[in-house]
Amino acid sequence: MPPPSPQSETSAASAELPKKRTKTTTSPVWDHYIVSWEKGVKMVKCKCCQVTYKNPSGTSTLTAHMSKHPLQLKPKPKPPIPAWCQQTSAEVSKISTQKQAEATGLLKKWIACSAKPFSTVEDPYFVAYSKSLNPAYKVPCRQTLRKLLVNDYAERRKAVTAELKSVTSRFSITCDMWKARSKRQPYMVITLHWINNEWVLKNIVLDFRYLPVIHTADNMKAVILDTLKEHSLQHRILCCTTDGAAAMKAMFRVLSLDTEKDRRLFGSNSADVPSFRIWCVAHLVQTVARVATGEKADIVGKVRSLVSFIHRPTIDEEYLKFAERSNLC
């Protein structure tokens, strides 16, 4: 009997492999769009007006676009609004432009500081709640809210840059790397510290940068230096606080060389005072504790397991079952 050919082995092996699971599109809005791929980018084209969207992240924009074609898309039935939230036309009073702007400003702060999605303002329950507080207040749509926040960010950025230029002292920065819990995405946070001309200690988050590349000294230095140059601070850094990671130490060495060149290039009065790095006290204590308890790793492991068990969401239920079995209650 002849041996099987390589092609037959390949086909048999491919038949045994599980098929890749694809994400299904359940929203009815996809019935009115044509999906295509161009150079690895998802393109979505409207069947009614041929408008094309590039790599849409969800269906909110597509659904909002279909409002221009009301006869094509059947709107989703909105949840019933409680009677206590409903307002009659007789109860609606006028609101001044100043009150409208103040309420919108508070709404912008709440959306930005609590990291709420822009679509929150289009939720019928949120609109009903806002109307119950003031029936005359007009809740902005998500597109308007986004534009307002982008404009506020640009104005705030200009104000911070102008304030930093007026400071006569040098600055210190704090750099740290962390990962988001959901998608494990790495980010670098750069915090700026200084004493203003009135001798008040101030700090601000200068940048919150996504860093998908390998965390080498050169890559991290490029991100920090780029952020400092955006605010013209590369020649005014006195101190950098980091953890004790080897990459952070190497990053500061190459960063200090560049900032020293910039200080002498800009003719800074404090060019003879070099920048220096401070090891974060919290990380230092953690390192000392880890080294000190190295011989008692078993005890530390048991304590860690106990703490993890206590923090489990079902600890109360499991403890009650154990107490019942042990006749403790």
Image (tube, rainbow, N blue to C red):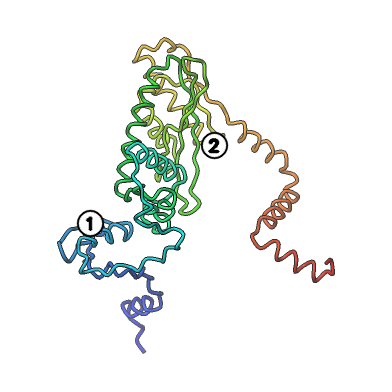
Q: Which mark is residue 104?
A: none
Q: How many marks?
A: 2
The amino acid type found where label 2 is placed reads Ala
Mark 1 or mark 2, earlier in chain: 1
Assess disc 1: are there few (<14), some (14-19) or many (≥20) residues with their C-alpha within 10 Å of its C-alpha: some
Q: Position of residue 321 (x, y in %)?
A: 75, 69
Q: Which mark is residue 53?
A: 1
Residue extending farthest to the top is: 269
Residue extending farthest to the front is: 90
Q: Is residue 274 above or below residue 138?
A: above
- CA gap between label 1 and label 2 equals 43 Å
Q: Residue at x 27, y 70 (%)?
A: 74
Q: Are marks 1 and 2 in contact (CB under 8 Å)?
A: no
Assess disc 2: are there few (<14), some (14-19) or many (≥20) residues with their C-alpha within 10 Å of its C-alpha: few
Residue extending farthest to the bottom is: 1
Secondary element at tag 2: loop
Q: Is residue 149 visible?
A: no
Q: Position of residue 178 (x, y in %)?
A: 50, 43
Tell me the quarter of the image containing the N terminus.
bottom left
The amino acid type found where label 1 is placed reads Tyr
Secondary element at tag 1: strand
- Quadrant assignment, res 258: top left
Q: Toward the viewer: 87 or 119? A: 87
Q: Position of residue 267 (x, y in %)?
A: 36, 11
Q: Is residue 260 above or below residue 184?
A: above
Q: Is residue 52 visible?
A: yes
Q: Position of residue 208 (x, y in %)?
A: 42, 38
Q: Residue at x 33, y 78 (%)?
A: 11
In the picture of the structure, the residue carrying the numbered disc 2 is: 245
Q: Residue at x 49, y 15 (%)?
A: 198
Q: Residue at x 40, y 66 (%)?
A: 79
